[in-house]
Image: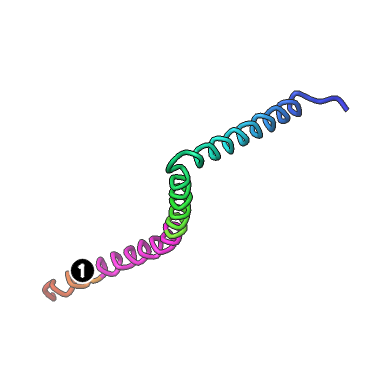
Amino acid sequence: MPQTKHTRRTDKDKDLISRLTEAGEDVLHRLEELPGGKAMAEAATSLRKRLDELAVRLRSLDPLEKRVSALEKRLEALERRTKAEEQESARPAD
């Protein structure tokens, strides 16, 4: 079956990605061999984990923000209604 341009490009992309992955792994291994490199790698891993935890916590705030917004709108409507009632009762009766 003849290869199309798209198939050849995908194969080249995969090859490029695998080469970049290998190069990245080599760099990480070299960094660990340097003095303090292992501590730096551990710190980077720890930072990644903390950022992931923070992202989860932030996503859990979205529903709460929506609920607060809805409650604020309801409160505003109630306050408007109360003000209107107060103004009506303050009018002199004819």
Q: Residue at x 43, y 55 (%)?
A: 50
**Magenta span of residues:** 58-81
- Taking the spot 17% from the left edge, 69% from the top edge, the residue there is 87
- Place of residue 56 in the rendered image (x, y in percent of width and height, measured from the top left): 47, 58
Residue 77 screen position, x and y as percent? 30, 66
Give amino acid for label 1. Answer: Lys
For the view shown, which residue lies furthest in the left direction?
A: 92
Q: Quadrant of residue 58?
A: bottom left
Q: Quadrant of residue 54?
A: bottom left
Q: Quick one: 81 or 7, which is closer to the camera?
A: 7
Q: Is residue 78 magenta?
A: yes
Residue at 47% x, 38% y is 34
Per the picture, the main secondary structure of the magenta-coloured stretch is helix
In the picture, the quarter occupied by the C terminus is bottom left
Q: In this image, 29 relative to 13: left or right? A: left
Compared across the picture, whether 50 is left or right of 80 comes to right
